[in-house]
Every structure is written in C-alpha cells, then in structure tokens.
Amino acid sequence: MALFRRRALLQEIVPADIPVPRFSIDGWTLSGSPLAAKLSSSLSRADVRELETLLHGVAVESDTPYTYEHAAVLLERADEPGPALSVCEAWLAHPASKWPEYVAHTRSIDKHRARLRIKLGARQTSIAGG
C-alpha cells in the first residue's frame, strides 16, 4: 500500500555553492557577498554572526556535525535551501560522518537533506510549470 510513500524526484537537483566567509578584524564575515543582504533581512544579527562562524567551520572541514547541522538550519531559515543542501552534502561526504559517535547526527543531517531535496524539487517544478 503506497499511502504514505512520497514520489521519487525525477530531475537531478544540483546543490548551490556553499558561501565562504572572508576574514575580517571582527572574525568571519559574509559582507560584500550577494547572500549578505538577504541574510541580514531574514535573520537576526546574532544568527548571522553565528552562521558566518559556522560556514567558516564548514569551509575548513570541521569534524563536528553540529557545525554542519546548524549551518543548514540557519540557511534554510533564511530561505536559502540550495546552500543548505550543499552543507548537508558536505557533512555526508566528510570522513567523520562515518564515525560511530556521530551516527545519530549523520542520520539527522541525512533526513534534513531529504527534506531539502523535496523542497528544491517542488520549487523547480513550480518554476518550470509556471
């Protein structure tokens, strides 16, 4: 019975580039990037600062799943599902994602990636259909 099964996506979803913050005197910043204006209008200042630090952790391939998980959540909250999907993919490609102590986190990030793929698939379908 296929009541609760979701349809498989027929198109390939290409993840967007992960924004890489640049070094500034105050730490890491995304100012000057096209994403900066959108982030400042949709996230609080504290969330933007945290996201900049988390994205630096992703750029240097940090071994902590929280870095990737929370960066993806903040990017999705800012209505940026493409970069959020890329962050999830980066963790799943990281060797630390296979470590036994991170099994629960990896499973959570994998589920988040699946939700983002569905969201991006719906967006692409609505753009192509409309």
Image: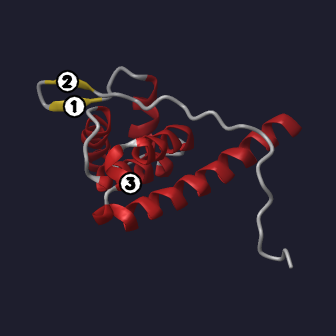
Whole-Å distance between the Cαs marked 3 and 1? 19 Å
Q: Where is residue 69 in the image (x, y as percent from the top left)?
A: 38, 54
**Kind of residue at badge 1:** Trp
Give the residue at x 84% y 35%: 128
Quick check: 26 above or below 123? above
In front: mark 2 or mark 3? 3
- Quadrant location, the C terminus: top right
| Rendered location of residue 18, percent (x, y) | 43, 32
Against 38, residue 73 (above or below) is: below
Earlier sequence position, callout 2 versus callout 3: 2
Q: Is mark 3 on a helix, strand or loop?
A: helix
Q: Is residue 117 left or right of residue 100?
A: right
Q: Alpha-carbon distance for marks 2 and 1?
A: 5 Å
Viewer-proximal residue among 58 and 104: 104
In whole angstroms, how far apart are the C-alphas of marks 2 and 3? 22 Å
The residue at which mark 2 appears reads as: 23
At x 52% / y 44%, what residue is drawn? 85
Residue at image position (26%, 52%) is 64
What is the three-letter code of the residue carrying label 3? Glu
Mark carried by residue 28: 1
Q: From the image, tell me which residue sits under label 3.
A: 69
